[in-house]
Amino acid sequence: MTRWRWDHPRQLVLGLLLWSLWFVAVYGGHALACRAGAPAPWIVTGLLDCTAIVVTVLAWAAWRCLAAARSLPAGVARFLARSAAALHAVAALSTVFVGLPILLVPACA
Amino acid sequence: MSSPGQLADGSGGPPDAAALHAEFERVWGNPRGWRALTIVNHSVVALRFMVTGLVFFVLAGLLSMLMRVQLARPGQQVIDAETYNQAFTAHGTMMMFLFAVPVLQGAAAYLLPKMLGARDLVFPRLSAFGYWCYLFGGLIFCAGLALGLAPNAGWFMYTPLSSDVHSPGPNSDFWLIGITFVEIATMAAGIEIAVSILRTRADGMALHRMPIFAWAMLVTSMMIVFGFPPLILASILLELERAAGWAFFDPTRGGDPLLWQHLFWLFGHPEVYIIFLPAAGMVSTLVSVHAQRPLVGYSWVVVSLISTGFLSFGLWVHHMFTVGIPALAQGFFAAASMAVAIPTAVQVFAWIATLATGRPRWNPPMLWLAGFLATFVLGGLTGVMLAFVPFDWQVHDTHFVVAHLHYVLIGGMLFPLFAALYHWLPLASGRMASPRLARLGFWLSFVGFQGTFLVMHWTGLLGMPRRVWTYDSGMGWDWPNLVSSVFGFVMAFGVAATLLDLALHWRFGRKAEPNPWHADTLEWAVGQPPTSYNFASLPPIDSRHPLWEQPQLQSAIAAGDFELPRAAHGRRETLGSDPVSGRPREVIHLPGNSVLPLLAALLLSAMCIALLARFYWPALAAACATTVVLLRWSWENCAHPKAAAGEAFDLPKGLALHSRTFDGPGLWGMGLTMAANAALYASFVFGWCFLWLVAPAWTPPAKAPLDVWTLPAATGAFIAGWALLRQLSGRLQHGVDQGLGLRLLAAAACGAAGCAVLGKALAGATLAPTRSAHDAMLAFLLVYLLLHGALAVLLALLQAARVRHGHVGLQAPYEPGVVAILWLFVVGVTAVAWVAFGLLPTALAGQG
């Protein structure tokens, strides 16, 4: 098993891949929970918790990539780590923005 | 590595440039006459893609003129309603599937090997096969138009309008079969371009030095890999419903027409960015060259491209805001639709900053770029307006949406494409276009476009629905429609002038000086027009702007100063590079010209035509014949003498031919093909869950039709076969080849056992796919698994035969690893089927 690296090219897609999974989870989870007749406050709490966890993970990953980039010399590794930091941050911000309707729009309506 | 120009066997330096050119032409040269049909060279195939695409563009444009004539005045009777329906369906379909994507992929296929420092794309015969599929699929589609049987349900083919009840003739079949055939080309090109970008870059061209157009095409190609399969699946399901009566979209039999909308737009919205991102890559390249400075914010543009690629998959439901989606779900998609504008805006600011801080010259490419910026930004803004759910409800299916999409697609694709054509014409032809005709073409197109579509927003806000063939006077739509029609013709004259300029310049244009725009990327180092082999030697790269820093690179390349400066061995070679660092890992040998791609595409065309005519036995015969041709094609591969001619002693030190290693483009090609296949399968599983949860008349049977052990037994058999393949591949890596053929036969036997289990289940289950969507989904699943299992068995047997003929073994250990990827996929899909189609329904039934 190779060591987890913050300058690995997989970091370029991992953040937005997590965003995609979160998106499917909240969209599908909301539909399933409403169909199962779960109480709306429970659904909102569940969706918010899920969103908060994902945002925290993405923000932490962005910070770790940025820290890795600062310690690397100029070259492809630093480019990858810096770009990955930005992409993790994009994923975190997208999660916050797309998740805002959970606070503003009633569930199952 | 050997020193530049020196051969590993020490046979001395390269000959002079002219002799070297003759040597390469003998191996890479393109035949003339009938034998030109066998050409697989990327430059030729790509030009064919672009010219064919432009012909389809002209046809689709003529249809739009017909529609504008019909709409110019209220109560017009120039064409009847049915002809109008066929015209708008064919116009949209041809522009999206036969023009936009193929032309951009053609441009990428032409440019990328040259930009990356390679001699060709990695799968040249696949390129040729893709082109023939595209041409024949397009011709099948156009045959429907010529016969008055063109599809008439709109380019997104919504069910139930496109189902056999409401479209009983063959019209919809022309779309479903013709366009699915064309999609083979799109998928093939997407996979090939992605692998080529990752694996055939110049020595030292690490990811941070990669041309920005390559980044754009890498993201686009990955989007194609995951974006097109949902549509391919939907088309297969709808054709099965129309031809065989299987129930997928019929709500009275447990299906749901909304499933079509989900699957279509899962493809359809990423498609917009699949069209835009290559154009954005061209724009980034061109603004940098014409401003004579590096692109501002290269890293930010890369980040924007990747972000757009992902975010664009989270927007599809914004096309379905009016179908009754819960408010919160609409909120998610509305927010995502707004969010995607941000990375696009980052690119726009990078382009403006590049132009503002550079020294732009107002030549024809820059004119089109300016037109693009003005138009596309407006289209983007109306896109953000449409992301607002209440506004979308008001203008849904009106001419406002038509105006928006034309701003995005013409502004975001056609204008950059014309800019790119003017920019790279001197490379392709060695001549310059006429500046006067170019300016006339631009200004007529730009003014005509704005006059047509800016006004159309107003028509839509006044409530005129799209796709109505005529309208009454007094609705307030008369003048806006007349203005749109008049300016539509102005635009048509502009496009005609531009196309005339592009055509005439090949003969009458003045000779271009070398690198006339003083560009920075490697494609301008291949000669104007390029040679068939691009580079006589493959240069190392240590900068993002090689030609700005080494203007004399072209002569050094032509003199054979760099890697692989020989072709006397008869092989077509290029360097296989590390995907991250760009350092060479092996020498990729490429297949030469062949009639097999054309033959396979012709047989597939015969199959499509037989399916259209509903002659199923001839269709099956054509499918079998296609399989035989494809197997023959795959036989002449890797270590086959026709694929790796000559002795391999003259390679750079430390490198081997890829077929003699465990690494190579085929691994990546198979991996991406299976990723696309996984996307199709995931769409199918989504469809199963969607119908189960949402379809109003979904009725699962009281007793599960499949025996509980069927899918686990099949999974187990396929796992055993895959394990054997993995084991024998590992043994080859350790230098052991005893029992190679026997192990492959044993793997095939395991696969055959899995297929037998599935076949028995299919024959034994009392499925009624014409009566229930539940049974139709299960029957489709079993056929899908069976076909993939059979393919895995067939390829294992083929490997065993290749071992027997010496094409696979210790000296050529590469192929079993490629086949193992397919086996792993078969294991995965069967296991997922067990969970999703076996365990999950049982659990749900238990709860119920």
Image (cartoon, coloured by chain):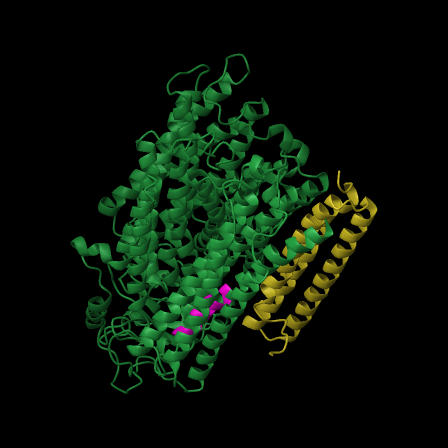
Chain represented in green: B
Q: Residue furthest left?
A: B33
Chain represented in yellow: A
Query: Which residue is painted at 68% across and 55% down in the image?
Result: B843
Q: Is residue B825 magenta?
A: yes
Res. B642 visible in picture: yes
Where residue B552 sits in the image (x, y, percent)? 34, 68
Q: Is residue B455 left or right of residue B803?
A: right
Which one is nearer the viewer's eye here, B342 or B845? B845
Res. B440 visible in picture: no
Q: The N terminus of chain B lies in which quarter of the figure?
A: bottom left
- Image position of B155 with respect to B23: above or below: above
Q: Which residues are magenta?
A: B815-826
Q: Is residue A103 left or right of residue A69?
A: right
Which one is nearer the viewer's eye here, B698 or A91? B698
Task: Determine the main secondary structure of the stretch shown in magenta.
Answer: helix
